Amino acid sequence: MIQTASIRKSFDTAIIGGGILGLWAARHAIKRGEQTILIEKRHIGAGASGGFLGALMPHMPDNWNAKKQFQFDGLTSLPDAIAELEADTGHDCGYRRCGRIMPLTHDKLLPQVERRLAGAKTNWGDDFSMTLEAPAAYQNWLNSDIASNGIQHDTLAARVNPRAYVRALEAYMRPRCEVLEGGEVRGVNFQQHDGEVMLANGDSITAGKIIIANGWEAYPLLQPFFAELNDNAPIGRGVKGQAVLVEYEHADDLPIVYHDGSYVVPHKENRVAIGSTSVNDWSGKPDVFDPEDMDFYRRAIELVPALENAPIIERWSGVRPRNTLKGRGTSPWFGPIPAYENHVALIGGFKITLGVAHLAERFV
Ligand SMILES: Cc1cc2nc3c(=O)[nH]c(=O)nc-3n(C[C@H](O)[C@H](O)[C@H](O)COP(=O)(O)OP(=O)(O)OC[C@H]3O[C@@H](n4cnc5c(N)ncnc54)[C@H](O)[C@@H]3O)c2cc1C
């Protein structure tokens, strides 16, 4: 058997994973003039970032804390970040600050809503608001029977087309750094001021900074460095989710509808995305859609009856990271590797990752 010598290359920055976080890390590194490589096991956008739901959902504005402030920073700085990306690449990311409505199904919810309205005034400033509207305020869009006690409306929520967003970041990155698609990272070896990325084919890459951004599949790479901090418990797992895309004629002036885990997200070109499920106990391929798991769709049609006859044009499933590192919950997890602070983990979370990914700049 002929054995080829393994290849060893050196960069300022090596990024593992070509999802929204790896791509933002690449954009920031390139802008700083760093020699950068992005290593992607499948193809750019193959993971959770390649879906179509794209809801950018603010946390509730009461009980303010650092996590909510971080997300607020992301949601309020995103329009400029996207405008700059679009100007750099000529790609449209399908962003719109569309707002969000949530039906109030019971009068018991009203005191909580009052606290949220007050919280929005204090914590969101003058540019964004949360208001209580009448059940019939969006009659042709939200089922007013479900909104029997009114509708909570906010003007901070937005939407983006995840695939278009990924394509724009890819268009920026490709000509400006090395991209290794089909390159699977099997291990990392950190030193204080540089590190080594080991590939499945035996090659290795050294870099001054290694950024681990390979979604739910990052946990085996990261576990050894965080195990002690987490009492040796697993630091995360992948949670599968499904969504469908329907065709529905609209003027692209509708808000997101959210209720009880169901999202209805209007997009450009007469598309509406509906999601999503959360399946902890899944096996097999992440991208195989389970046709039995359609309750989320039926609930969404009850919420927005106008979509009842809208044809489904795509079914999609993906796996998002569910961080179980102490105190992190479903939030994204951006931060240095303990004892090797030059190297960074950028792991997404549920719901909001697309709204904060550009803030990776603070960590890389
Ligand atoms: C059904 C569903 C609906 C969602 N809806 C929303 C929403 O509306 N709004 C929102 O903000 N978020 C939403 N999310 C969450 C969001 O999509 C994810 O949090 C986000 O895309 C994660 O981005 P990422 O870059 O961390 O990971 P990914 O996009 O998964 O990218 C990781 C990449 O790393 C690659 N990779 C894996 N292992 C290796 C390896 N060993 N070597 C090299 N490369 C590797 C993968 O192929 C992949 O391309 C949803 C997720 C799902 C599943």
Image (cartoon, helix red, strand yellow):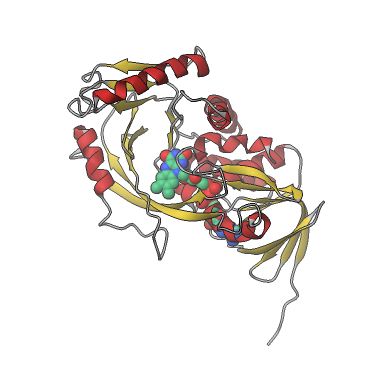
In the rendered image, the vertical position of residue 338 relative to residue 168, given as above or below: below
Query: How many labels were placed on the picture?
Result: 0
In the rendered image, the vertical position of residue 318 relative to residue 360, given as above or below: below
Quadrant showing the N terminus: bottom right
Viewer-closest of 337 and 314: 337
In this rendering, would 364 be left or right of 271?
right
Q: Quadrant of residue 173?
A: top right
Q: Which residue is rendered at x = 24% and y = 16% of the image?
A: 134
Quadrant showing the C terminus: top right
- Can residue 134 be seen from the camera position used here? yes
Q: Which residue is rendered at x = 31% and y = 58% of the image?
A: 290
Viewer-closest of 331 and 141: 331
In this rendering, would 172 be left or right of 282?
right
Which percent across, then down, holds residue 178?
A: 68, 52
Which percent across, then down, holds residue 194?
A: 80, 54
Q: Which residue is rendered at x = 70% and y = 84% of the image?
A: 2
